[in-house]
Amino acid sequence: MHAPVCQMDRRTSPLRMAVSKIVLSYGASLALSVLAVGPALGQAMPNTRPADQGREREVPRREEPVYRNGREDRGDNGGYPTSDIHSAVEANARTAYARANYHRLQDSVNVAIRQMQSSFDQSPELMDARKAEQMAWEDYLAARNAALKTVVADPKYQANAALKNDLTEQIAEVRTSFDSRKPSHGRVAELVDQSKMSKVVLLATVKLDYAQVTTDMEVTALKGDSKVADTRGKLMSAGARVQALREGFDRSLRGSPELAALRSKIEDARVAFITAEAFRDGAVEAASEALDYAYYKNRHGSYAGYEYGFSTGGYGGGR
């Protein structure tokens, strides 16, 4: 007879006591059965405990990036057109280089021409020719002034020269007075201009007559002087020598092998520049198309509230 588990009061019925005894007996039997069968079940059932339980979890190693053609290969990159973008950037840089090289060669031709011009101007041959021309001009002026001394002292020459100078001043006064008092009315201003011009033409005609007299006297005096003729010939010869040197330099400049080589390089640089621009335009267009394709390929699928949906199914083009 087992001892009672709980203290029962006086109001407990015999039926309730009987039920409690049955439950306690059944629970003890079940516990003994579990203790007996437990080791057998443990041997029969497989060990489902994780293999890494009880030891530290290994930290995965970081994979080193793989580089291809100087760039890090990130796999698919989510569809981003990395190579196309890099190609557009490189094409733009190459175009900038081609443009700069083309302008640099153009500047080199200008610099070379200026250097050749400076070398020619400082050449001893040209400097001697210019010096001889200047001396011939000074000799001619001295001979001319000496030949005109008798003409300048002539009273007829002095009178005509004075009248010529006086008419020059009158013409200037007439033009100034008409300009200061010009009427605002169109028709009246036109009549005034006609009258002014007629007066100016009359004064200029008279002045030309007096000037012609003085010029004829000078020409007659200069033709009869042999020294003036000799110095004039030397002056013309010196001027012709300088002109011949300049023409020879111009011909040598146009046929210079150095400039011809530079011009050939300029043409090659121009062709390369045009080609680089065309390649840049194509690369930029291809990069734009690739970006558009990547955008539509990786765009969100069909969501509620959107009229059109895009997905990555099928051939990757979306719908």
Image (cartoon, rainbow, N blue to C red):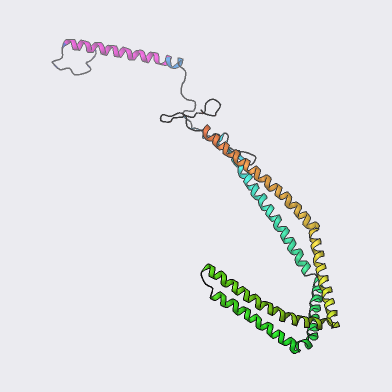
- Relative to 251, does residue 96 appear above or below in the rendering? above
Where in the figure is residue 300, as x and y percent of width and height? 47, 32
Q: In which quarter of the image is the N terminus?
A: top left
Residue 243 in which image quadrant = bottom right
Q: Is residue 45 above or below residue 315?
A: above
Q: Is residue 137 visible?
A: yes
Main secondary structure of the magenta stretch: helix
Front one among 285 and 299:
285
Q: In this view, does 241 lie to the left or right of 76?
A: right
Span highlighted in magenta in the image: 14-40
Q: Tell me what residue is drawn at x 79 percent, y 61 percent.
A: 253
Q: Note whether 245 is above or below 310 in the view shown.
A: below
From the top left corner, tell me how far across and down residue 108 is, in percent.
72, 58
- Note whether 188 is above or below 166 in the view shown: above
- Name the quadrant containing residue 187: bottom right
Residue 15 shown in magenta: yes
Residue shown at the point (62%, 41%) measured from the top left = 283
Query: On the rendered structure, is 286 left or right of 39?
Result: right
Q: Is residue 59 magenta?
A: no
Left/right of residue 221 with respect to residue 84 in the rendered view: right
